[in-house]
C-alpha cells in the first residue's frame, strides 16, 4: 500500500549536479507528496535551477546562517521539521536515484526504520572516479564493515521522531543508525537499488572524505582498533589519521 513520502534535498552550491539529481527524483514510479529543498548559503545557480524544474508546491528553504557546528546535519533537521507523511526520503543533491527508489524504500519502511540504496561512484566522471568505483566493488566480496549510506535513504518519520530527529554531528546518518538500533529499530541497505554518486572525485577530495570519516568515527565513539582495521582492510589510511588527530571531546553534539 503506497505511503505519503516527503523528499528532502540538501544542497550547497550544487549547480553542477542538482539538475541530474532532480531528474531522478521527478522520474520516480510513485511521486512524492512533498519535495523540500534546503539551500545552504548557496551563491551559485542551485536555487534557480531547482525552482525551474520542481513542482510549484515544492518548499524551498534558503538558509542564510549556520546555527549548528555541522551544516549538513542542521539542513537535515530543518527539512525533517517541514516534512509530511510517514516517510522522509533523503536524496543528496549529487546523487542520482533509480526510478523505483521511492516505491521500494517507502514500502520497506513499514517494517524497517531506515532503508538505504547502495550508492556507487559514477565511473564516467574521470579516472579517479573509476578507481574509487573499482575499490567500492571490494564490498561485493567482503561486505563486512560496509555501512548504509545517508545520501539515498528513506526513514520512517515515526522512528525518526522517536529518537529526537537528527543531531549536530559530523556523520548524522551513521549517528541515526546507531540510535535507531539502540531503540530496538531495524535498518538495512537494499543492494537491489543502486544510486550513483555524481560528484567528480580528486585525490584531495578523497583524502578529505577519509579524514572526515575518521573524525566522525571518533565523535561517535567507535573503537580505535575497529577504525584501524577498517583503514587497513579497506585501503583508507587517512581514516585512521582523522581518528587519531581528533581530540576525544572535540566537536561534541550540541543537542
Image: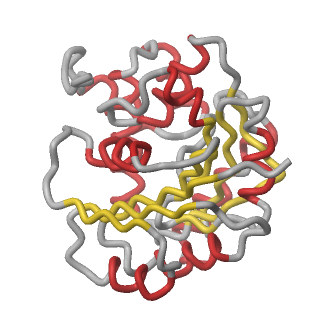
Q: Residue drawn at (63%, 45%), measured in percent from left and top? A: 154
> Looking at the image, is 155 positioned above or below residue 232?
below
Quadrant of the rendering where the C terminus is positioned = top left
Q: Residue drawn at (20%, 39%), measured in percent from left and top? A: 68
> Looking at the image, is 140 positioned above or below residue 144?
below
Residue 112: image quadrant is top right
In the rendered image, residue 145, in percent from the top left (x then y), is placed at: 64, 28
> Looking at the image, is 215 positioned above or below residue 163?
below
In the rendered image, residue 53, in percent from the top left (x then y), is placed at: 50, 85
Between 62 and 73, which is closer to the camera in this rendering?
Answer: 62
Q: Residue drawn at (79%, 40%), measured in percent from left and top? A: 108
Q: Is residue 203 left or right of residue 145?
A: left
Please say whether residue 123 is visible from this viewpoint. no
Q: How is the image coloured?
A: secondary structure
Q: Residue drawn at (55%, 61%), measured in percent from left and top? A: 34
> Looking at the image, is 45 positioned above or below residue 22?
below
Between 20 and 3, which is closer to the camera in this rendering?
Answer: 3
| Number of residue marks | 0
In the rendered image, residue 62, in percent from the top left (x then y), is placed at: 25, 65
View extreme (bottom): residue: 52
Residue 157: image quadrant is top right
In the rendered image, residue 55, in percent from the top left (x then y), is placed at: 52, 78
Amino acid at each position: 500500500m503506497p505511503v505519503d513520502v516527503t523528499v528532502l534535498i540538501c544542497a550547497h552550491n550544487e549547480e553542477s549536479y542538482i539538475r541530474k539529481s532532480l531528474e531522478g527524483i521527478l522520474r520516480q514510479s510513485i511521486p512524492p507528496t512533498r519535495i523540500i529543498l534546503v539551500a545552504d548559503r548557496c551563491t551559485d545557480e542551485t536555487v534557480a535551477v531547482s525552482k525551474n524544474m520542481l513542482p510549484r508546491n515544492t518548499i524551498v528553504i534558503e538558509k542564510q546562517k549556520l546555527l549548528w557546528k555541522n551544516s549538513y546535519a542542521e539542513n537535515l533537521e530543518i527539512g525533517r521539521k517541514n516534512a509530511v507523511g510517514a516517510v522522509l526520503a533523503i536524496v543528496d543533491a549529487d546523487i542520482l536515484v533509480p526510478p523505483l527508489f521511492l516505491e521500494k524504500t517507502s514500502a520497506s519502511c513499514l517494517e524497517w526504520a531506515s532503508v538505504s540504496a547502495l550508492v556507487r561512484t559514477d565511473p564516467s566522471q574521470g579516472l579517479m572516479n573509476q578507481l574509487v568505483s573499482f575499490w567500492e566493488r571490494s564490498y561485493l566480496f567482503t561486505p563486512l564493515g560496509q555501512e548504509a549510506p545517508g545520501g539515498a535513504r528513506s526513514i520512517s518519520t515515526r522512528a525518526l521522531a522517536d529518537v529526537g530527529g537528527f543531531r549536530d554531528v559530523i556523520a548524522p546518518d551513521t549517528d541515526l543508525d546507531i540510535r535507531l538500533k539502540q531503540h530496538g529499530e531495524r535498518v538495512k541497505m537494499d543492494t537491489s537499488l543502486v544510486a550513483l554518486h555524481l560528484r567528480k572525485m580528486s585525490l584531495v577530495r578523497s583524502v578529505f572524505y577519509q579524514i572526515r570519516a575518521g573524525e566522525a568515527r571518533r565523535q561517535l565513539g567507535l573503537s580505535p582498533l575497529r577504525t584501524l582495521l577498517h583503514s587497513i582492510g579497506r585501503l583508507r589510511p587517512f581514516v585512521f589519521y582523522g581518528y587519531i588527530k581528533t581530540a576525544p571531546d572535540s566537536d561534541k553534539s550540541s543537542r
